[in-house]
Amino acid sequence: MDEQKLLYVICQTYTKDGLKTLVIRSPMQVTNNLQIPIEVSLLKPQVNYGEKDPQNLNTLSLDSKGRTTHPTHSQGLERHDMVVQAESSSIIPLRACNFDKVRIKPKH
């Protein structure tokens, strides 16, 4: 059985024209105060789903500011790679919040 971990989320509600909308957001973000972009890799032990990944983690996704994020599988670790531009912040997607290690390096 997998280890259970708590994951907190931010819930926001908006009402417009009588329609209530619930937005669920990640509470985690990376802020880059440098003058160069950085590459951030979030790592956790890989779960073997075989040929097909039921969570569809190999698809391209966009963060809240429209930047691309790339979840990938390699070398026994599940990785979520993202680029944070200079002097900006990027929200970590909910499915990547359950990581064990973080690697940060300048983007070339």
Image: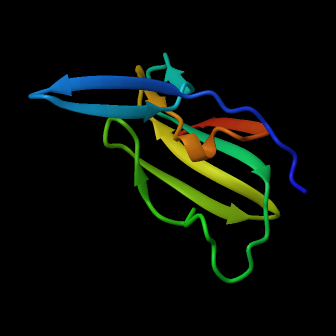
Q: Nearer the viewer, residue 96 or 86?
A: 96
Residue extending farthest bottom: 51
**Total of numbered circles in the picture?**
0
Residue 108 seen in the current view? no
In the image, taking residue 108 as reference, residue 4 lies left or right, namely right
Q: Is residue 70 above or below residue 86?
A: below
Residue that protrudes farthest toward the left in the picture: 17
5 relative to 13, above or below: below
- Outermost residue toward the top? 33
- Please name whichever residue, 105 or 16, is drawn nearer the observer in this view of the structure: 16
Task: Kindly identify the residue that appears in the image at 54 percent across and 25 percent down.
Answer: 27
Query: How far from the left and from the top, in percent, is residue 78?
Result: 72, 57
Which residue is pictured at 70% across the width and 38% down the height? Answer: 103
13 displayed left or right of 103: left
Q: Quadrant of residue 42?
A: top right
Percent coordinates x, y for residue 53 in the rendering: 63, 72
Q: Residue at x 52, y 41 (%)?
A: 93
Q: Position of residue 3 (x, y in %)?
A: 87, 46
Task: Classify 90 as above or below 82.
Answer: above
Q: Quadrant of residue 1?
A: bottom right
Residue 33 makes an appearance in the image: yes
